[in-house]
Image: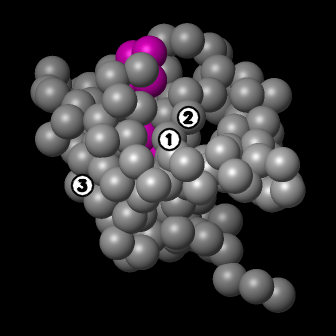
Amino acid sequence: MPALPSIALGCDHAGFRFKELLRVSLTARGHRVADFGTFSAVRCDYPDFVRPAAQAVARGECDLGIVLGGSGNGEAMVANKVHGIRCAVCWNVQSAELCKQHNNANVISLGERMFPEAELFPIVDAWLTSVYEGGRHQPRLDKVDAM
């Protein structure tokens, strides 16, 4: 059985609760989790925690990354500033499946204020289990990666 991917986590105060739920669950399921914080619900700035998580993925220290905030938008913007990162904001199962299947997203961004807790694990699991389709999508990714 292949090893489960290692996952970098990073969030601000608005994504802290979901990040903690993911950290515990992913670790219990056998993933190696690198938690880049934040480590409390005290107000903070997301770039301080999201950038190191994205850099860990870009350097190959972690296979994948999940970043979290209130909407997930700012976190995705920060992650996508790191060369080699393809971060997609996900808000439901279909968005999570498609970002892997068509864009080979190696990081996803989740907004804790955008969907109920009951949808957290279905979204993450959809992304983790989806497979990049390649083919017609690869020339587009080659252009993105060349930027």
Q: Which amino acid does label 2 sit on?
A: Ala
Taking 43 as reference, is 59 left or right?
Answer: right
| Mark 2 vs mark 3: in front | 2
Residue located 69% across and 52% down the image: 139
Does residue 139 appear left or right of residue 47 in this picture?
A: right
Above or below — where is 37 with respect to 142? Answer: above
Q: Residues within 10 Å of mark 1 (few under 14, many from 20)?
A: many
Helix, strand or loop under label 1: strand
Residue under label 1, please give it. Answer: 87
Figure quadrant of residue 47: top left
Front position in the image: 134 or 127: 134
Q: Mark 2 points at which residue?
A: 88
Query: What is the magenta range?
Result: 65-72
* CB under 8 Å between discs 2 and 1: yes
Residue flagged by tag 3: what amino acid is it? Pro
Residue 14: x and y in percent read 33, 21
Residue that numbered label 3 is attached to: 52
Q: Does the rendering let one see residue 29?
A: yes
Which quarter of the picture shows residue 59? Answer: bottom left
